Amino acid sequence: MKFSFLDFPALNAHIWLRMIKNFNFNASDGENLKVTTYIEHACFSGNSIIFVHGFKGFKDWGFVPYVGEYFAKRGFFVLTFNFSHNGIGDNLTEFTELEKFAENSFSREIRELNEIINALKENSFEDKVSGKIGIIGHSRGGAISLLSTVERKDVHAVALWASISKLDRYSKRQKEEWRKKGSFEVMNMRTKQIMRLNVSLLEDIEKIGMDSIKNTVRNLDKPLLIAHGDQDLAVPIKEAEEIYSWSDKEKTEFYKIYSTGHTFDIVHPFAGTTDKFEKLLDKTSNFFINNFK
């Protein structure tokens, strides 16, 4: 558990308490998920936000701790976490569990996110959480957020940041080689690590279905924010436009951010915020506040 305080002038009698807690959450299969929560008790509304990281992402990457503190200051209880097989172990900023990373799947992440939501509702992390729940999913985490919550009435709004619109992101030739070798290798450009994906991930994609995200968005009966940078090279903005085309326009906002990419000009290690990222945060905060009234 870690505490920090936002200092006020000495003559100000009010004390603003910020609480940041770390948890080890055991999933139903015994796997461990590392969780960090953020709350500002002086302004807490009772509502919650869960942040879902993407492929090669983690809860301590770049902007994520800043996101936690930002939304806590705006009255939300914020929960960030690592999926059990995202490759991050006890070293919270380095990929040291590459065997687990290779064995990860969409189905596992969908199950784990649902278990996190259930635990939040059962007050496993904070006993004062009783309001509405929102989800922010970045990149692949956007797809996981949609697939996990489409049928949940207890998740009230979803925000997608640079989300993918399809699970199958591989060419026919890549998939043939993947099946032949039993694994597919990807390069982590930041760490220069070769990270393997077992063929079980490809089989999981085929099991879930190629049109799963399209069908999910068409059946999503809750407010949706789609935010995407127009210079995103990792996930082209065309994918955001696809998601918007499938959505209920009466419940969906499409926020295009010009001249920025997949992480909205934020780097890891975190080197400070940017004007574009602050606008994204404000847009997302207002989206949840307006839809949680």
Image (cartoon, rainbow, N blue to C red):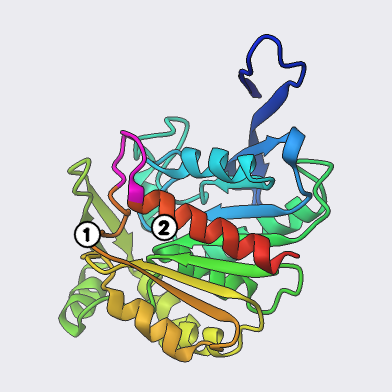
Image point (31%, 33%), residue name: 271
Rendering coords of residue 85 (x, y %): 46, 51
Rate crowding at label 2 as few (under 14), some (14 to 19) or many (20 or more) other CA atoms within 10 Å: many
- For numbered disc 1, what is the local secondary structure? strand
Residue type at mark 2: give it. Gly
Work out which quarter of the rendered image holds the C terminus and state it. bottom right
Q: Nearer the viewer, mark 2 or mark 1?
A: 2
Is residue 274 shown in magenta?
A: yes
Rendering coords of residue 291 (x, y %): 68, 68
Work out which quarter of the rendered image holds the N terminus and state it. top right
Q: Which residue is mark 1?
A: 185
For residue 32, say whether it is visible: no
Extreme-top residue of the structure: 10
Q: Is residue 149 above or below residue 82?
A: below
- For numbered disc 2, what is the local secondary structure? loop
Extreme-front residue of the structure: 11
Q: Which residue is mark 2?
A: 54
Residue type at mark 1: give it. Glu
